[in-house]
Image: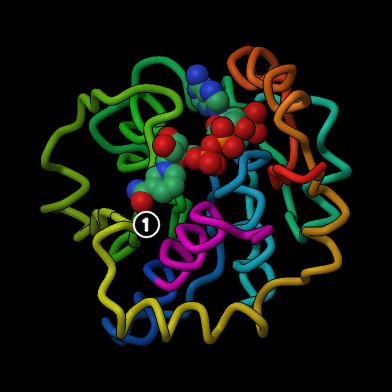
Amino acid sequence: MMLGTAGFTALLCSFAVKAKEELLLGEKVKDVLVTGATGGVGSIAVMILSKMGYDVHAVTGKKDKNDYLKGLGAKNIIDRKEFEGESKLLEKGVWDGVVDTVGGAALTKIFAQTKPGGIVAACGNAGGIKINTNVMPFIIRGVKLWGIDSSGSSIKRREFVWGEAAKLIDFSKVKSFTKELSFTELLETYPKLLKGEFFGRAIVNPNK
Ligand SMILES: NC(=O)c1ccc[n+]([C@@H]2O[C@H](COP(=O)([O-])OP(=O)(O)OC[C@H]3O[C@@H](n4cnc5c(N)ncnc54)[C@H](OP(=O)(O)O)[C@@H]3O)[C@@H](O)[C@H]2O)c1
């Protein structure tokens, strides 16, 4: 319940990044970027990828959540502003893998900064739907865009991914940032959600 679709999506994205080593038999994954890192998908992806042994670079717009992200396993925190604005055709390649929950200008810059053979697992559009990219990252560096569609996953894939959850997710940590809300509390929470002020996971308990 605490993980929900966000947790499932974080697992799908993390296994997509890991595919660089296993499915594509590429070089070892080291540096992985996660955007929207304090969000539902982002937080759980930070936790999973750090458990997989990667150096996780967490991008956030919330300056007061550095300790939270470090507690989940992030090695480095990056201000969201660094992923705004125009990108060059290619920039210095720094990411072996990326979990992108944001889309838009951030995703454009991410393509330009992904190392040769790196995998970008794109699942979200919290920052926008348009990407203004070019072919260079794909034809010069072989960057791979791995679209994530949690609802379209096969039963076989669901069974595999959920089967791995217990090994990769610290449920006591997830519990520490999960609240139980009544319907009334949910109504009070929606405006905060829209303003980007809500933080953590919420389970709605109709009996509360
Ligand atoms: N493809 C799928 O199957 C699938 C499944 C689940 C969710 N999704 C999508 O994935 C995305 C993330 O879902 P979620 O449940 O994690 O949402 P969430 O809890 O609302 O988190 C989104 C995070 O994105 C960042 N953000 C918000 N507005 C932004 C902006 N304008 N520019 C850049 N960053 C911004 C914030 O993180 P910081 O403050 O830390 O930067 C926020 O916490 C959503 O777009 C959702 O629709 C897709």
Q: Amino acid at mark 1?
A: Lys
Question: Is 10 within the magenta?
Answer: yes
Left or right, 90 with reference to 195: left
Left or right, 144 with reference to 204: left
The residue under label 1 is 115
| Residue 82 appears anywhere in the view | no
Instruction: In this rendered view, identify the residue nearer to me: 51 or 109.
Output: 51
| Residue 157 appears anywhere in the view | yes
The residues colored magenta run: 1-15
x and y percentages locating residue 123 in the rendered image:
37, 47
Instruction: In this rendered view, identify the residue nearer to me: 119 or 198.
Output: 198
x and y percentages locating residue 50 in the rendered image:
67, 68
Identify the residue at the far front of this view: 207
Left or right, 43 with reference to 34: right
Question: Is 166 within the magenta?
Answer: no
* Quarter of image, res 22: bottom left
Q: Quadrant of the C terminus?
A: top right
* Quarter of image, res 147: bottom left
Using a 10 Å C-alpha cutoff, classify the residue at mark 1 as few (fewer than 14 neighbours), some (14 to 19) or many (20 or more).
many
Instruction: In this rendered view, identify the residue nearer to me: 184 or 33.
Output: 184
Colouring rule applied to residues? rainbow
